[in-house]
Amino acid sequence: MDAAAPDAPPAELVPVRKGWRREVWVLVAMLVVLAAPWLLKPKESTAPASYDRRLVILTPHHEKIRQEFALAFTRYWREKTGQVVYIDWRTGGTAELAMLLRSEYGGAFQHYWTRTLKKDWSHEVGLAYANSKLKSTDESAAGVARRAFMESNVGIGIDLFFGGGSFDFEQQASAGILVAADPSGKFGLKPLREKHPDWFTDEVIPPSVSGEPFYDQEMRWVGTCLSSLGICYNSDVLKRLGVEKAPTQWADLADPRLIGQVALSDPNKSGTVTKSLEQLIQQQMQLRLEELTKDPATFSTEETRLKAALEQGWERGLRLIQRVSANARYFTDSATKIPLEVCQGDSAAGMCIDFYGRSFEEQVRKADGSTRIHFVAPVGGSSIGVDPVAMLRGAPDPELAMAFMEFVLTPEGQKLWNYQPGTAGGPQEAALRRLPVRRDFYTAENQALMTDAGLLPFEQAKLFTYRPEWTGSLFGAVRFLVKVMCIHVHADQQRAWKAIIAADFPPRAVAAFEDVSLVNYEATKRLAADLGKKDKELEMRLTREMTQRFRRHYELAYQLAKEGK
């Protein structure tokens, strides 16, 4: 056997020495990956390593809005006080955040009731604390619980609720979760109005516009920016489907050629879509009223004419919702996904809020100015609403909470919503494409620097008047109805709709498909009252029974369509 060369290394060490450079580079690559968050960290971070005060905000606003307002407010507060503020965002969909608030405050009040007040907890107390229908003079156990909550400073460690629709804020205000001021009376929207009375006038922030409230009369919330609801659509997809005319009205989403091509989200998780559907219904009510007014001899009084218009318009609206739903690709869990699907070409059109539609329109705009994504607010079918801000009961830092609300309403804060990125006072990174709530903001000087300079929201508002007395109390019922007649039975609904289209809309099949007698206007009022009881067993029973009824309707429609009847 030959002896190994005296200078040769041991055989088992050779592979290690040959591969050492590769392992070093792998280690370097791993270190780069781990260090990237620190290397790429913005110069002005919204989460400082150390801070003097923390503001906790619950919000459905997307990341760009959160980033721009955090940067602007923390800079403003540091310049004013020398203090470093950390804004701790807690995010989710508006409907989900509303449920979170009820759940968290329920737990917090139970702790206060049993530990501080030394009282026995019960199911009745749990339902009563947020029940706005209970009077302060009610001496029942429920009344005592409600009064105890309203007189307390029970909190959940969150300062502000920022963003969403006015309906959800009204619900939280009625429940007692939103407050006009802290216990000292020094901080909150009520003292803010006393500090700036000129802000809360018709010339700056009016109480309401075209039926939509712009701030709460008790100052528990105030709008910060404007929004309208409408349709985003992909012109390339429409062309591929043979749809020559772009949608301009809610009814255009019921076009049979759009089957499987409409993007919708679950109204039970999205206040935006629920509001869109409510406005769709109100438009049908208004159109029916205009039709009936043309023949004044038909009704003896204006009251009976209005009653008929509301009942018939309600049913027309539900039937339109059925057709739009039958065209839906599926129901997403978030309204923010709708314009994304349309932009990607997975859907042709969908319901969305204006700034999402315009943001995607801008993202895909070509150098020649053309874009495949467009947004349109249905004329006469969409109102101008607000995205509010409010202080929560038991806010940990009410002084800072008030300062943030004040900043958002100042001209400086309003610039962030629609100034072009990089302009003095505007957002740093991206256009937010929201419209300021202050009427006095729309000057020639400001509009020259706005990303949506051509939009005049207070003029647009004149074309549609929202009437809360028509459907406002049915907002929650609309969510429920869409669940039982559309979402839970979507496969059955779409199967029937396809058969009806294929058979060229045979009348009996269409009548079976659109049978909404079970949920007519008066029946839905009773349904809303039942849902308002917050009885889970009752709600589950109603869900089961009504889902089965609509499933049978769609099965009958399918069979009739197959027979050509």
Image (cartoon, helix red, strand yellow):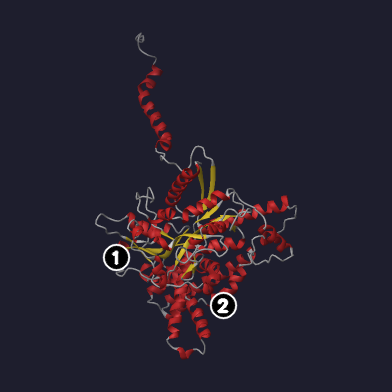
Q: Position of residue 8 (x, y in %)?
A: 35, 12
Q: Which residue is farthest bottom?
A: 297
Mark 1 residue element: helix
Label placed on residue 239: 1
Seen from the viewer's position, the closer of residues 486 and 374 is 374
Mark 2 residue element: helix
Q: Residue at x 45, y 80 (%)?
A: 288
Seen from the viewer's position, the closer of residues 463 and 266 is 463
Mark 2 belongs to which amino acid? Glu
Q: Position of residue 299 (x, y in %)?
A: 50, 89
Mark 1 belongs to which amino acid? Lys
- Horizontally, residue 486 falls left or right of residue 103, namely left
Seen from the viewer's position, the closer of residues 39 and 510 is 39
Find disc 2 in the rendering and name its residue: 522
Does the CB distance between marks 2 and 1 fall below 8 Å? no
Q: Position of residue 163 (x, y in %)?
A: 49, 57
Is there any visible trace of residue 509 in the rendered image?
Answer: no
Is there any visible trace of residue 238 in the rendered image?
Answer: yes
Q: Nearer the viewer, mark 2 or mark 1?
A: 2
Q: Position of residue 309 (x, y in %)?
A: 49, 81
Q: Residues within 10 Å of mark 2 (few under 14, many from 20)?
A: few
Looking at the rendered image, the quarter that the N terminus falls into is top left
Seen from the viewer's position, the closer of residues 182 and 549 is 182
Q: Which residue is farthest left?
A: 368
